[in-house]
Image (cartoon, rainbow, N blue to C red):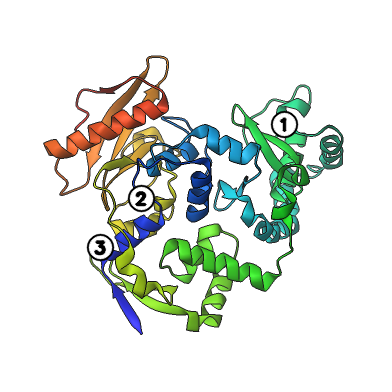
Amino acid sequence: MTNLLSNADARRVFIAKQGLSAPPNRALTKDGLLQLIHDLGFVQVDSIQTVERAHHQILFSRNQTYRREHLTSLLEKDGALFEHWTHDASILPSAFFKYWKHKFVHQEEVLVERWRKWRGEGFEDAFEETYDRVVANGAILARDIKADGHVSGGWWNWHPNKTALEYFWHTGKFAIAGRSNFQKIYDLVERVIPDEFREPEVDREEFIDWACRSALSRLGFATSGEIAAFWNLISPEAAKGWVAAHREELTEVIIEPALGGKPRPSWALAEFPATIDGYPDAPPRIRVLSPFDPMIRDRNRTERLFGFFYRIEIFVPEPKREYGYYVFPLLEGDRLIGRIDMKADRKKGTLDVKRLWLEPGVRASAGRLDRLAAELDRVARFAGVERVILANGWLG
């Protein structure tokens, strides 16, 4: 049986799956934070701090009682979370680590040849020396073993030891033990990830089943391509094969797009249609989302569900930018209503709002602007600044 899911219901389900329907002021304990990240699946890490780093803002968007020190404790003391790659560098529950071992095996097979093309012959000369040093001396920063005279230039110009550290991290020999001024601290994986999360071994069939089932449960509904892309652990072909093999456990759902057009066939777990009415409405408040928020990570899905076209313009030359370097999407209830260009100036203690763009048909009513002002005040406090400054012409 094929089920038609209205656009409003699809948005309600997906927003709830993304943790954005829960009361945003309910006290979030450290255990609650771990559960939130588990339910989301991952939280992307990014160094840009225009207002606040992406991982902090993603969590704050869902709960305004979020405490950064809880995240640090879960990562660096409890070993309940670890850092690795999904589509990008992310924070993940350590309970998932055993599944990442399959990614490590794949990386070992492809990374050396890929990096040799990038770095040139001999790029692995420092591997043995670097590994032995970490074994003997413990956790280390790349700068601690940087060769004299090497001029760093970002990821494209890693020094040989940094290349080794990254290789062993990507292939599961090292793990991130913490960060110092956002620079990774590397150590042996067995010193960072608790034993309980490194065992038992998972065979490939169980791994693929987990990767697909866990992705689908977090998305609510998805194509096989979206299932594969969620963790970025398996190929679209593997996800398509899983759907075919588990067809009796799935139901086809036709998703109504936001802006009309042909509804999109997707898959959901068989019990999904019976649960739709149980998903709550999103709170009506306005929330500022990180450009790396998992709700909008899949830009095409975002456009289909919300009718909202979003691309980050960090790498777009300034004269060609439509909006700005680092522009934040705005979620109001179950709608993405616009985007805002702002920056925290910690020296002046201000959150400087340069420009607001509302989507077509979204009015800058007094009530909406009041809700936005309340959210900007919340964001300012979280970023550690005292007041919000609105630039002349900020409303466009």
Q: Mark 2 = which residue? A: 22
Task: Give residue 87's position: percent from left, percent from top.
Answer: 54, 52
The residue nearer to you, when weighing 318 against 168, is 168
Q: Nearer the viewer, mark 3 or mark 1?
A: 3
Q: Nearer the viewer, mark 2 or mark 1?
A: 2
**The disc labelled 3 sits on which kind of residue?**
Ala
Q: Mark 3 = which residue? A: 8
Task: Give residue 274's position: percent from left, percent from top.
Answer: 35, 74
Residue 133 figure quarter: top right
Q: Mark 1 = which residue? A: 142
Looking at the image, residue 33 lies above or below residue 272: above
Please indicate whether residue 237 sits to the left or right of residue 295 in the image.
Answer: right
**The disc labelled 2 sits on which kind of residue?**
Ala
Disc with the residue nearer the chain's start (2 vs 3):
3
Q: Quadrant of the N terminus?
A: bottom left
For label 3, the SS is: helix
